[in-house]
Amino acid sequence: MFVDYLSHVLGTVYKVSGDIQPTWSFKELEVDSLSLAELSAQLEDELGITIEEENLSADTTVGELSELLEASGAVLPA
């Protein structure tokens, strides 16, 4: 559910090009640590959840982050 949302955010805000796969890590997508911190803050603001620093790293995959968002009760913005 959140994979499409994350793909959209990564493509529009962080200029990640191409078809983003859930199995790809942020390292593979070339998203640096500063961008990950910004992404975490953006998701917290938009989705009303808290993402612990250890749950979002360069080795985290898009699918893992999607699962984390779903498990934390995040709701997609309308």
Image: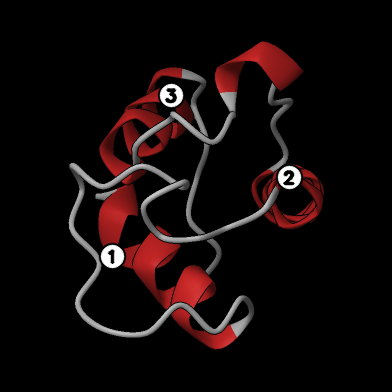
Picture residue at 27% right of the left edge, 38% below the top: 63
Identify the secondary structure beneath mark 1. helix
Give the left or right position of residue 47, taking residue 72 as reference.
right
What residue does disc 3 label?
68
Identify the secondary structure beneath mark 3. helix
Q: Residue type at mark 3?
A: Leu
Q: Is residue 17 above or below residue 64?
A: below
Q: Residue type at mark 1?
A: Asp
CA distance separating discs 3 and 2: 19 Å
Say whether disc 1 or disc 2 marks the residue closer to the N-terminus.
1
Q: In this view, does 76 lie above or below 52?
A: below
Q: In this view, does 71 lie above or below 17?
A: above
Give the left or right position of residue 56, taking residue 65 as reference.
right
Q: Is residue 30 above or below residue 28?
A: below
Picture residue at 43% right of the left edge, 24% below the top: 68
What residue does disc 1 label?
4
Q: Are marks 3 and 2 in contact (CB under 8 Å)?
A: no
**How far across and down, in percent of the image, does residue 38 sit?**
80, 54
Between 43 and 23, the one lying in front of the other is 23
**How far across and down, in percent of the image, does residue 67 sit?**
32, 28
Give the left or right position of residue 38, taking residue 13 as reference.
right
Give the left or right position of residue 38, taking residue 77 as reference.
right
Picture residue at 75% right of the left edge, 42% below the top: 44
